[in-house]
Image (cartoon, rainbow, N blue to C red):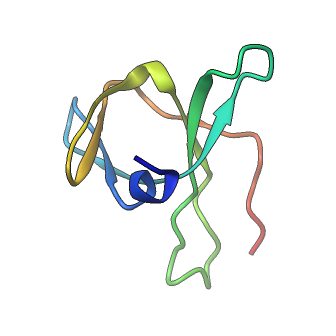
């Protein structure tokens, strides 16, 4: 599976079925080369005209299952300190 394949799947919280968005990037641990977390870019409000929600960070360990259409996670996403500009 490629990052492109992974980015086409919706990320769903197992606790409540909430769709968190899609994976846009992967963060690696520079020391050992392992995947550390995944980044979900904030969704645009009114097509981005009213800005964007915060980006979300999910630890790789929170991924429970990668299916044909969705990625199931068991964690509360953490907002990233980075803010997207309008």
Q: Quick one: quadrant of the C terminus?
A: bottom right
Residue 43, percent from left and from top: 51, 65
Could you say which quadrant of the image residue 83 lies in? Answer: bottom right
The answer to whether residue 11 is left or right of residue 54 is left
Looking at this rendering, what residue extends furthest in the front direction?
1
Q: Residue furthest top?
A: 32
Q: Position of residue 25 (x, y in %)?
A: 60, 49
Residue sitting nearer the eye, 34 or 61 = 34
21 above or below 80? below
Which residue is at a point 48% across and 34% down the rendered structure image?
77
Q: Which residue is drawn at 32% across and 25% down?
A: 74
Residue 5: image quadrant is bottom left
Above or below: residue 21 compared with residue 85: above
Q: Toward the viewer: 31 or 20? A: 31
Q: In this view, does 59 lie above or below 40?
A: above
| Left or right of 66 in this view: 28 | right
Please, is residue 32 above or below residue 68 in the view?
above
The total number of labels drawn is 0
Is residue 61 or residue 54 the one in the foreground? 61
Give the image location of residue 41, x and y in percent.
58, 56
Residue 76 left/right relative to 36? left
Q: Which residue is drawn at 20% across and 50% down?
A: 68
At which x and y percent is residue 70?
Answer: 25, 49
In terms of image quadrants, where is residue 22? bottom left
């Amino acid at each position: 599976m490629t990052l492109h394949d992974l980015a086409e799947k919706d990320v769903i919280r197992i606790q409540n079925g909430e769709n968190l968005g899609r994976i846009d990037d992967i963060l690696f641990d520079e020391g050992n080369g392992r995947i550390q977390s995944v980044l979900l870019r904030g969704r645009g409000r009114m097509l981005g005209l009213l800005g964007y929600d915060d980006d979300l960070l999910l630890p790789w360990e929170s991924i429970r299952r990668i299916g044909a259409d969705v990625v199931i996670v068991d964690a509360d996403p953490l907002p990233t300190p980075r803010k997207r500009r309008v």
